Structure formats: structure tokens, C-alpha cells
Amino acid sequence: MERKIFVQAERLMLGNKVMHGYIEKIRDLVRKGSRHLYLMTTECFNADALEEIRAVFDKYYVRYDVIVYSTPEDAVCRIKDEVGDYDSRNEVRYLIIANKEIEELTFGHTIYSAIQWPSFEEEANHSLDHAFWCESPKITLHKTDDCKKIEKVVFLDIDGVLNTDNRYNEENFVAINEKFVQNLALIVHETNASIILSSSWRYGLQDLYYRIGKEVDSSIKLLVDTLQKYDMHIYGMTPVRFNGPDGRPFEIRAWLSDKSNLKNFVILDDETFWKWNWLKSHVVCTEEKYYSDDGECERRCGLTYEMAKKAIEILNRNE
């Protein structure tokens, strides 16, 4: 299996200075296993700085290819060319170290050069083990007359948002709590937003809508029926990619990548371990921590009225 590392030259600079220590990190990543390095640069990049960067890589006997691009979109196209055609992409794992403009356009792993070692090394190696380019077709569950009319989106997690996510400790656990659904309905109807499922419940929804021969989970049917009761539908779902703290943010970004007409979105999720990066300002976390009478730190989950109002504020931002 091939592993490829794409590094934007400007990420190796701090002001006008080349970060030799950071290049050493890249060197260590390349040397660990069979990994190929691509140095990405623009024609207007400082020529002297580029020569210095290349000299440092040469000093460490790091082999690399140079990719010259004109725009962030061009950079992504060139990365895709190097990753290969659709069939071969599953055989390539890769890592992109680039700025926000390129990160927003990529379907896979981008990490920030500001991350401190060893966290940087851990994230980089995770990407090189698990990140493959996968442009899954978007699955639309509820057909609209014109999907381009969707201007606002709620990315919906289920466990911990529409229930308490306490199924193992709660004797009378409710898979879908109608009180939380009512708060979701408040968001959807006040903002005219569409629901895109980002939860792991997506697997069950595929079974329900596409009848792939598996028995439909009763909780999935309960979800769909309860949403319909409040005049809500699931319009689609994020592509299923991979697990880990980078997983859900990248899946959401992948869904967003070709939605140029979208005005705003909010992410409802109870988990705090996701690495949201620039998506963070769109997140409403439905987990609350508190101390019990005996001093233990406890957590409670579920979409409250106050959280719903915060989500509405995010969706109506800049109007």
C-alpha cells in the first residue's frame, strides 16, 4: 500500500524564515515506512525560500517531487491526480499539510503545522494509516423539488442529541426522546433548515431506505416516524468514511464541499473528542457536565431548549 505526504511550501515558513525543525518532522514521517513526499508550491512563492527548503530536504536525503499549482482548487486536482484513479485510491493512504483554503476543499486528511509534537506525529501517522480518497455518491433520502434551494442545514447526531445516550445505565432508556425532537423541530421550522444525518445511525437508515436485505432496526423506524410527526424529514446523510477523532469533521466537510448555495449550517453533536478545527463555531454540543451530590463529575446529554435557541442563532448568523 502506498503512502503519500503532500506538504504546502508556505507551511514550512514562519514569516520569512524556513522552519528547519519542522522540516525534520517531515523527514521523520517520510523515513517511517515507504512514504513519498510531494512539495507543493505556487509560481509566485519566494524563490530563495523554496531553494532553501529544497536544500534542507536534500541535506537529509529526502526524495520528493514538486507540484506547482495556481489556485487551491488546482492544488486539490493535482493531489487527486497523484492519489490515482477511483479504483486505486483505496490502495493509497495520504496526508496533506496545507492551509485552510486547501483544507476546505479536500475530502481527506489535512493537519495543521502548528500542532505540537508528539500530537502532530500521532495525527500524521493516523492519516497515513487510514485516510483514503473516497468520493461516495451523496445519498438523498427525502427528495426535494430542487436541492439547490436548501440554504441551511442541521447536521444531526442522534445518540446524546435526541436521547440521553445512557442506554447501558438507564433502566427505562428511550431511543428517541420526544422532548428533544420538539426542540429540534423548533430549530428546523424557525430557520427552514434541512436535516442531514451525521450520526452512526446512517447505517440503519441505508437499510431502511434501500432495503439491502437486513432487518430494519425498530429504533430507526421510530426516528423516521417521530420526525414525520413534527413535519420533519431527513434530506440526506454525510458520506461514510472512517472512524477516529478526525472522522466526523471530515465527513461533514466532504458533504459541504460542493454546496455553494448553502448559507449556513449548525452541527448538533454530544461528543467532545471530535477535532472540529474551523467547524467549531458551528457546533452546538449537547453534552453538559455537572457534579453530583457526592462530588462525582457526571454528564447529561440531550438537545435542550437553550441549545436549540443557540443553534437558531448560528443558522441565522449574518442575516
Image (tube, grey):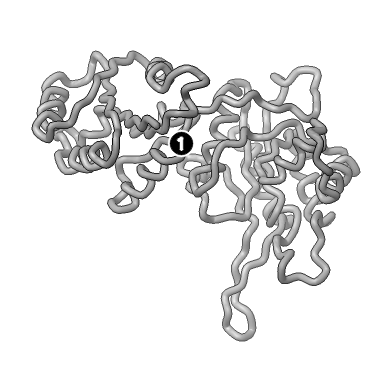
Q: Is residue 11 left or right of residue 229?
A: left
Where is residue 252 shown, x and y percent of the image? 58, 36
Q: Nearer the viewer, residue 255 or 64?
A: 64
Q: Residue 300: x, y in percent?
A: 67, 66
Quarter of the image where the C terminus is located: top right
Q: Nearer the viewer, residue 38 or 104?
A: 38
Task: Tell me the amino acid under the disc marked 1.
Answer: Ala
User: Residue 40: image x %, image y %?
Assistant: 28, 23
Q: Nearer the viewer, residue 5 or 271?
A: 5
Could you classify mark 1 by the number of other residues whose Cα lies within 10 Å: few (under 14), some (14-19), or many (20 or more)?
many
Give the residue drawn at x 46%, y 36%: 131
Seen in the image, is 133 located left or right of residue 240?
left
Query: Residue at 74% of width from left, 55% of height from top?
Result: 305
Instruction: Name above or below for residue 227 compared with residue 150.
Output: below
Residue lying at 70% horizontally and 36% vertically, measured from the top left: 196
Image point (77%, 36%), residue name: 234
- Quadrant in the rendering for residue 142: top right
Q: Position of residue 57 (x, y in %)?
A: 15, 31
Vertical arrangement, residue 230 with respect to residue 192, above or below = below
Which residue is most to the bottom?
A: 294
Could you tell me which secondary element the residue under label 1 belongs to?
loop
Q: Quadrant of the N terminus?
A: top left
Task: Left or right? Give the position of 34 relative to 94.
Answer: left
In the image, residue 187 above or below residue 69: below
Q: Nearer the viewer, residue 125 or 165?
A: 125
Which residue is the site of mark 1? 131
